[in-house]
Amino acid sequence: MKTTSPFAGLMRQSPFKPIQKHMRIVSRCVAEMRPLFDAMIKKDREQINALVVKIGELEGEADQIKNELRLRMPKRLLMAVARRDLLSLIQQQDAIADTVEKISQIVAWRDMEIPEAIEELLLNLVQHTTDICSQAAAMIEQLDELLAVGFGGKQSGIVSEMITNVKRSEHKIDFLISDLNRTLFSIEDRLNPVSAMFWYQLIELIGDISNQAENMGDRLTLFIAS
């Protein structure tokens, strides 16, 4: 029986189309982080709650695509990329959306104020995290072009450079996190101990996102090298 599933239509076009669609939703999820922290600065609880709901909905959309891909992807793909590698790639993408949702849930559960001493550093970290996810999304948009040239040639060089840039960004974010943690530690005695614990957790989660973006680059490196 002929299927009318939109997902099946994407799979017929290219096995990468669902992965690209998934990453676009993940990117939208990440893009809500800066408004979320801006709302925290303004102490706008109504806006915070609205953004938490939006992030949850986007994460749910991403999960649905990931689950459909797992169920519908053929056991054998007549292409250079192994099925398990494609599933690993979308898992790394999905981990980003999961992490953003975890961040939003902490903000929703606990009425947290951003200490003035870390505000600028925190927003800088959030912006760089958003940027690295945009770089990772741009890599994913190159998958069809890579497939067309058999994961070689000039196109593979372009994507390799994009992967290198993601790694550079992740390295820079590591330094930003160190500065932020150091500053937080310097004011820790002025904070509620539980609040300090949650801030360290939030910073760690934001850092996880850049690690997950770098992991995506590592998966694409395997595609090119295979």
Image (cartoon, grey):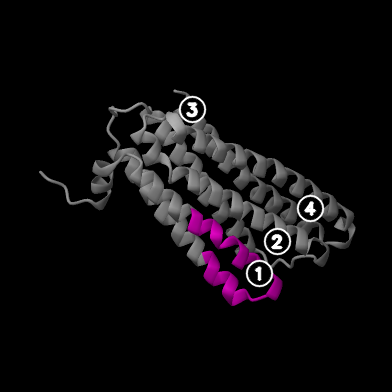
Q: Helix, strand or loop at disc 1? A: helix
13 vs 85, left or right, is left
Indicate which disc, 2 or 3, sits on the residue closer to the N terminus. Answer: 2
Residue 179 magenta: no
Residue 32 magenta: yes
Q: CA distance from mark 1 to mark 3?
A: 38 Å
Badge 2 crowding class, 10 Å Cα cut-off, few under 14, some 14 to 19, many 20 or more, is some
Q: Which label is found at residue 90? A: none
42 vs 51, left or right, is right
Which residue does the numbered mark 4 point to in the structure image? 180
Q: Is residue 111 above or below residue 163?
A: below
Indicate which disc, 2 or 1, sits on the residue closer to the N terminus. Answer: 1
Q: Position of residue 77 (x, y in %)?
A: 29, 29
Indicate which disc, 2 or 4, sits on the residue closer to the N terminus. Answer: 2
Q: Helix, strand or loop at disc 4? A: helix
Q: Residue placed at 62% from the left, 74% from the top?
A: 45
- Which amino acid type corresponds to the residue marked 1 in the rendered image? Asp
Q: Residue furthest front?
A: 154
Taking the image as drawn, is residue 91 in sight?
A: yes
Query: Are circles 2 and 3 on residues that touch, CB within 8 Å?
Result: no
Indicate which disc, 1 or 3, sits on the residue closer to the N terminus. Answer: 1
Depth check: 123 or 202 in front?
123
Badge 3 crowding class, 10 Å Cα cut-off, few under 14, some 14 to 19, many 20 or more, is few
Which residue does the numbered mark 1 point to in the structure image? 38
Q: Which residues are magenta?
A: 27-52
Image quadrant where one finds the C terminus: top left
Q: Position of residue 174 (x, y in %)?
A: 72, 43
Query: Are circles 2 and 1 on residues that touch, CB within 8 Å?
Result: yes
Give the main secondary structure, helix, strand or loop, of the magenta stretch: helix
Q: CA distance from mark 1 to mark 4?
A: 17 Å
Which residue does the numbered mark 2 point to in the structure image? 123
